[in-house]
Image: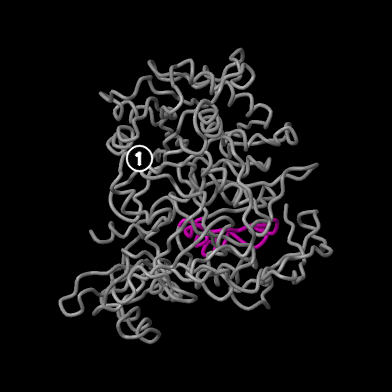
């Protein structure tokens, strides 16, 4: 369903905020609903049509906040907040598998979560124990996550593509007492938990249909079978502190180093769902009557973006979540053609795909209200190409695993920004140069982004030093560079550790990548700094050329030299078949260093 409304601005006396009054919606035949599309080719490129406020909110110490008032964050557990209004959409579809068609109504989902919680307790998983979740995007992910929440068991999230060695490291570090996976991954799990004293149960296996599970494994179906009591109905208690105890333990490399367990509490996750729900940041509506938000999810649930923003947030709204266990362009195309998708949460590679693949066109997003990209920055050239082709606006959000994840987003900010600071959050832009080191910077000054808010983690699991290194009191040091403009919009310039120092001058890889991507023969690009005898460091570009296009190193160098100052010129060019990226779309620069 799509509902883009026509707004006009109203000044509220005594406040800098500009609120909006809803005017009459227009007709939309393709979606059989009433709305007005908020994008037109006549708008200034990349700029939003509506201004939300008169300027940023910043105090005398250069601490920035949202232009909107803080809101109350309710106490309680994640499962309680998600299920708060579930009776209103009891019979609607909650989750459906895009491959098998297997689905669960909200009524059934709630019942199965309660059964799974009881089964965890009966298998001697107690409050504070850890369950390692090694699952693709399947509907059962919600049963596992919310059932574990109800039982007071924390979940640590693993990429199903990990090797046994990689899984073993996280299973040991997280002190996992049990592991749940699918049949395909069972041999890898068995190898990864061999000899691990913390793991007290055989692997739990989610099987497809009626297929048997491997001998020695626990069948997930047996843990949610008819006849099992429901946790809440027999008076069981979750038994942990919602503000202090960890409920989700995803792993992140943080600003540097090896992956570390990020301790997120019930309050962290609930706070971030509330921040995402705020009407000034979102156009989603809870299910009512025939209305239901429809969202295909290919961002992995093991990533905090998919876990909180796509899974828990939309279950809280009574949305219909289409789970994609494995992403392929054909699968996405099929889903967009068969469903009136109302929201698309993506990473840059998906924007790139929809821009370059001729099979995708504007009809596939005509019912989409929210098209939000996160996980890695979008370049302005890519945004411009996408909007020109799809005739649809796109926005960016910003967040980190350590912030549960959202820090900023917006409905109407410039597409090259990552939106407005979320409610209940504060940001400092901190100088890293010697002359003002550690000082808070003001408008349009670039520095490291520090974040404070109810969504910020309690720390890294069993890693006091890493926690101390990344915290300044209550402030999380993100390692990202950015600035805030006169409208309160946050812009990301890159990673502090990724900056290239050319004769002492800072060069942002993201700036070079954005420029080079605009070349008509370039399909993808990544830039890193490499040692240089005279300059200290120099930019090196890795180029993926478009099919049937011939492009030379000199063409790339000249293209950049004609447009940027000398210290930003490309020193080396290497042509490769594919830019290495994480599942979330972040460029794996360490892999490029090896080429």
User: In the rendering, at what x and y percent does residue 561 appear?
Assistant: 34, 85
- Numbered marks: total: 1
Which quadrant, please, contains the C terminus?
bottom left
Task: State the residue at coordinates (73%, 61%).
Answer: 4
Q: Is residue 538 left or right of residue 290?
A: left
Q: Which of 578/219 is in front?
A: 219
Q: Is residue 61 left or right of residue 255?
A: right
Residue occupying the point 39% across, 58% down:
477
Q: Tell me the residue that label 1 is attached to.
A: 461
- Please name whichever residue, 16 or 482, is drawn nearer the observer in this view of the structure: 16
Compared to 436, does 405 lie above or below? above
Q: Position of residue 567 (x, y in %)?
A: 30, 82
Residue 333: within the magenta? no
Callout 1 crowding tier (Cα within 10 Å): few <14, some 14–19, many ≥20: some
Residue stretch in magenta = 347-375
Residue 109 placed where, x, y %? 63, 29
Q: Identify the image quadrant of residue 318.
A: top right
Left or right, 433 with respect to 208, comes to left
Residue 336 in the figure: left or right of residue 170: right
Type of colouring: one colour
């Amino acid at each position: 369903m799509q509902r883009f409304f026509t707004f006009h601005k109203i000044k509220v006396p005594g406040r800098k905020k500009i609120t909006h009054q809803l005017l009459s919606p227009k007709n939309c035949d393709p979606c059989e609903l009433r709305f007005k599309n908020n994008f037109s080719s006549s708008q200034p490129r990349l700029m939003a049509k509506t201004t939300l406020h008169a300027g940023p909110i910043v105090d005398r110490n250069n601490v920035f906040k949202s232009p909107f008032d803080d809101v109350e964050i309710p106490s309680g557990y994640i499962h309680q907040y998600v299920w708060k209004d579930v009776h209103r959409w009891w019979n609607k579809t909650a989750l459906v598998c895009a491959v098998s068609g297997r689905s669960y109504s909200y009524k059934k989902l709630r019942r199965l979560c309660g059964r799974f919680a009881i089964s965890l307790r009966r298998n001697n998983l107690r409050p504070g124990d850890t369950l390692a979740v090694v699952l693709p995007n399947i509907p059962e992910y919600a049963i596992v996550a919310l059932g574990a929440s109800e039982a007071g068991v924390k979940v640590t999230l693993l990429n199903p593509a990990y090797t046994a060695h990689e899984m073993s490291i996280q299973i040991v570090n997280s002190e996992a007492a049990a592991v749940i996976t699918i049949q395909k991954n069972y041999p890898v799990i068995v190898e990864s938990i061999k000899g691990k004293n913390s793991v007290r149960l055989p692997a739990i296996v989610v099987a497809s249909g009626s297929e048997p599970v491997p001998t020695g494994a626990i069948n997930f179906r047996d843990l949610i079978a008819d006849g099992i009591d429901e946790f809440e109905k027999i008076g069981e208690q979750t038994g942990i502190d919602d503000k202090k105890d960890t409920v989700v333990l995803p792993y992140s490399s943080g600003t540097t180093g090896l992956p570390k367990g990020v301790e997120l509490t019930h309050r962290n996750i609930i706070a971030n769902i509330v921040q995402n729900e705020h009407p000034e940041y979102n156009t989603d509506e809870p299910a009512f009557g025939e209305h239901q938000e429809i969202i295909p999810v290919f961002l992995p649930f093991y990533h905090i973006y998919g876990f909180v923003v796509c899974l828990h947030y939309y279950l809280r709204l009574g949305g219909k979540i289409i789970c994609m266990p494995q992403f392929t362009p054909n699968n996405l195309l099929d889903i967009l053609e068969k469903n009136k998708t109302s929201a698309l949460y993506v990473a840059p590679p998906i924007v790139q795909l929809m821009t370059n693949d001729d099979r995708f066109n504007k009809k596939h997003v005509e019912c989409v209200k929210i098209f939000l990209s996160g996980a890695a920055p979008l370049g302005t050239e890519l945004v411009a190409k996408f909007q020109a082709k799809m005739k649809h606006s796109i926005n960016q959000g910003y967040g980190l695993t350590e912030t549960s994840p959202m820090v900023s987003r917006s409905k109407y900010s410039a597409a090259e920004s990552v939106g407005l600071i979320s409610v209940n959050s504060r940001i400092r832009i901190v100088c890293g140069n010697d002359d003002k080191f550690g000082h808070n910077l003001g408008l349009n000054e670039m520095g490291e982004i520090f974040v404070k808010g109810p969504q910020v983690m309690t720390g890294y699991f069993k890693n006091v030093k890493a926690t101390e290194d990344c915290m300044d009191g209550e402030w999380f040091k993100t390692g990202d560079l950015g600035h805030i403009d006169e409208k309160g919009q946050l812009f990301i310039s890159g990673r502090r550790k990724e900056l290239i120092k050319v004769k002492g001058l800072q060069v942002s890889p993201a700036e070079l990548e954005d420029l080079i991507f605009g070349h008509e023969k370039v399909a993808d690009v990544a830039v890193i700094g490499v040692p240089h005898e005279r300059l200290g460091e120099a930019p090196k570009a890795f180029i993926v050329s478009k099919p049937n296009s011939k492009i030379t190193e000199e063409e790339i160098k000249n293209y950049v030299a004609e447009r940027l100052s000398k210290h930003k010129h490309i020193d080396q060019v290497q042509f490769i078949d594919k830019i290495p990226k994480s599942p979330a779309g972040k460029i794996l620069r360490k892999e490029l260093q090896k080429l």
